[in-house]
């Protein structure tokens, strides 16, 4: 009998490479006794340069609440099992499984592409989310500094920006965030799934510790940078019980608002997550799977706007109430934040100002 833990890929989230829906042929390990059973499973992260012509993307989803997003990296070394961005890796010819966290596309030349868009005559000034897909502070950012370049650019143009991350590398850029905060141009959400480090290592193997994430909230709050906590995704039977503790600890460290999403397993993510679930929690895998499905009308994913983020049904309602009660108890009312869209300054507005003078 094969011990599943013997073949468990430590330090990685996904344990398999799923089939790319755009590929006609499927590659994989079909016989565990094969002599080439490890073929295709590269352990070392690869960084692949790309050169986009445009960088800021229009967001049409009514669930997001922001008009634009920008992602300096495609794929993410954090390796979070549940990440909805995994499916987007298939558009590049890769798998949503191990490829997503081992083959990272680095978007070079983005500052120039970004400035070109911001200087468009009819550019509409609305908040940009950094990032809407993969974490802009994943490990390679320490070397590439693409995110820092982006922040320098939005500061130059006085453009509003929203950040969401789970990496303490954001504290490197606290000087830029402070300057942006002076004009109400920035808001940060720190993602915290739960407070159990054992679970974090299983779910998000290459992310910073939960204690460090609360430290991020504390440090940003000290510098008067608007910050909140995103409890996401909440997974029934694994992290759902820890919602009150996450919000309590975040509030103690200065979080002024909180949000949450319920896990949903769209596309190939369902295959990645189920494989991981059966290997990591074999005793409760089916129960957790059924609870997730119960939150999405009997399926593990529901793509309908308005329900996909928070689910529906009895279990989803229990989680929603637990979140609301916890926020009310530890934070009070979620403090509103309004981005400043009046400070924006590009070459066209400069010409208008010069003409007026």
Image (cartoon, grey):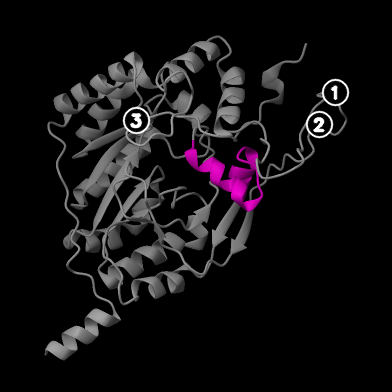
Q: Which residues are magenta?
A: 83-103
Q: CA distance from mark 1 to mark 3?
A: 44 Å
Decide which of 258, 139 is in the foreground and name it.
Answer: 258
Residue at the spot x=47%, y=24% of the render? 199
Residue 28 percent across, percent down from the top left: 76, 34
Residue where numbered disc 2 is placed? 37
Q: Residues within 10 Å of mark 3 (few under 14, many from 20)?
A: some
* Tag 1–tag 2 contact (CB < 8 Å): yes
Quarter location, residue 318? top left
In the image, residue 14 above or below residue 31: below
Secondary structure under the numbered disc 1 in the rendered image: loop
Residue at the spot x=30%, y=51% of the render? 66
Count of picture labels: 3
Residue where numbered disc 1 is placed? 33
Residue at the spot x=15%, y=44% of the render? 336
* Tag 1–tag 3 contact (CB < 8 Å): no
The quadrant of the image that shows the N terminus is top right
Residue 265 percent across, percent down from the top left: 50, 30
What number is the disc on residue 307? 3
Q: CA distance from mark 3 to mark 2?
A: 41 Å
């Amino acid at each position: 009998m094969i011990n599943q833990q013997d073949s468990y890929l430590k330090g990685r989230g996904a344990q398999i490479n799923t089939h790319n829906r755009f590929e006609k042929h499927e590659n994989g390990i079909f016989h565990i006794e094969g002599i080439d059973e490890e073929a295709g499973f590269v352990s070392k992260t690869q960084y692949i340069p790309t050169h986009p012509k445009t960088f800021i993307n229009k967001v049409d989803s009514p669930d997001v609440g922001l008009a634009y997003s920008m992602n300096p990296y495609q794929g993410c070394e954090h390796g979070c099992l549940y990440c909805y961005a995994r499916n987007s890796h298939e558009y590049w010819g890769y798998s949503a499984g191990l490829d997503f966290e081992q083959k990272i596309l680095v978007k070079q030349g983005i500052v120039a592409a970004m400035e070109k868009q911001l200087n468009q005559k009819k550019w509409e000034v609305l908040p940009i989310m950094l990032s809407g897909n993969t974490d802009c502070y994943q490990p390679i950012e320490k070397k590439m500094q693409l995110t820092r370049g982006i922040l320098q650019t939005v500061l130059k143009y006085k453009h509003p920006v929203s950040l969401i991350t789970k990496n303490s590398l954001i504290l490197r850029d606290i000087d830029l965030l402070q300057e942006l905060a002076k004009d109400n141009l920035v808001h940060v959400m720190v993602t915290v799934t739960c407070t159990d480090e054992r679970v974090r290592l299983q779910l998000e193997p290459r992310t910073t510790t939960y204690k460090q994430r609360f430290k991020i909230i504390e440090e940003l709050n000290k510098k008067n940078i608007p910050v909140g906590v995103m409890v996401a995704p909440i997974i029934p039977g694994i992290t759902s019980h820890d919602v009150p503790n996450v919000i309590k600890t975040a509030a103690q460290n200065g979080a002024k608002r909180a949000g949450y999403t319920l896990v949903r397993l769209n596309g190939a993510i369902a295959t990645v997550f189920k494989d991981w679930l059966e290997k990591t929690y074999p005793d409760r895998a089916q129960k957790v799977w059924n609870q997730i499905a119960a939150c999405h009308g009997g399926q593990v994913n529901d793509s309908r706007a308005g329900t996909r983020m928070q689910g529906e049904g009895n279990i989803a309602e229990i989680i929603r109430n637990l979140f609301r009660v916890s926020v009310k108890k530890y934070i009070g009312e979620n403090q509103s934040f309004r981005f400043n869209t009046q400070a924006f300054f590009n070459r066209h507005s400069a010409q208008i100002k010069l003409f007026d003078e």
